[in-house]
Image: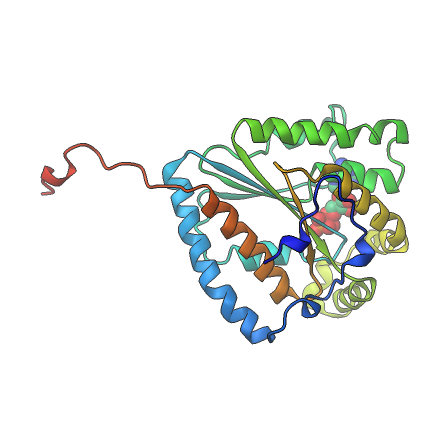
Amino acid sequence: MFEQFRVKPDQPVRLSDFDANGKTYFAGSKDEAKQQFKPLNLKLRELQTLLYAQGKHNLLLVLQGMDTSGKDGTIRGVFKGVNPQGVNVANFKVPTPKELSHDYLWRVHQQTPGKGEIKIFNRSHYEDVLVVRVHSLAPEERWSKRYHHIREFERLLADEGTTIIKFFLHISNDKQRDKLISRRDTPRKQWKFNPNDLKDRALWPDFQQAYEDALNKTSTEYAPWYIVPANQKWYRDLMVATILVETLENLQMHYPPAPEGIEEMEVI
Ligand code: ADP
């Protein structure tokens, strides 16, 4: 259903070819999308319980997108009602001095999921080829090698049993303006308003280019990127939940076997 949004290795995409409006791709109404979402959310809850109970697989979900693209909202919306045991979020902010004294993957590797766990990266190692590139926080000679490191890092995780899916939340420039204005003018949202976001907004084309390169250079069979039209949250959540459920179903998980002789065990 969402195959057209998966970035295929060796088939470079242009972000401008993707409409950020989910409405373009969904013939139904917002209410219909919400109806479709409900059973998916229930399925996700069930699959997460199974993943946790079996303790055999682990899942890493990477969320990236421009400021206001809805990373927090996706986590809240898609994982609504999912048992918080076994689902964790790692937020990657400006690195601390200690983190900066190591290589850029050091802090990331520590946060990868263990068996039975789902880990959501809210921002990720991709910041090291996005903000670092756009703001020249490292010379090109350094960040340009990182696409290769990242592919190999993700290969290592995948080879050792981690299932990886990566979502780029694609919003339009106009949508970002509306959301920033709403953050500025709504008291309960003002805590989210970061003046630095305005500086990044002024660099919109550079960020789009950096994203496009990251998507094209690091989408692999074992760690695919999906471009998620994210102007409408109902479409965004429907797409993320569908891909997540499909991915978990493909793991063909089973509950662990019952203890030997369970039927005869007397419960007093
Ligand atoms: P968010 O926007 O994720 O809700 P913040 O407003 O605290 O949270 O922003 C986190 C900031 O940290 C972002 O501007 C992001 O670009 C920055 N950041 C994350 N990783 C790095 C990195 N490796 N180097 C520099 N800046 C980073």
Q: Quadrant of the C terminus?
A: top left
Question: Is 192 situated left or right of 43 in this image?
Answer: right
Colouring convention used in this rendered image of the protein:
rainbow
Numbered label tally? 0
Specify the quarter for ligand 1: top right
Measuring 63% from the left and 54% from the top, which residue is drawn there? 72
* Residue 54, above or below 77: above
User: Looking at this view, is 154 or 49 the one in front?
Assistant: 154
Identify the image quadrant of the N terminus.
Answer: bottom right
Residue 236 visible in the picture: yes
* x then y, percent, for residue 153: 66, 28
**Residue found at x 18% / y 32%:** 260
Report whether 171 appears left or right of 80.
Answer: right
Q: Residue at x 70, y 40 (%)?
A: 219
Task: Choose between 76 and 171: the one closer to the eye.
Answer: 171
Say which residue appears at 59% left-offset and 29% top-offset.
Answer: 157
> In which quarter of the view is residue 223 placed?
top right
Please identify the residue farthest to the front as the structure is shown: 11
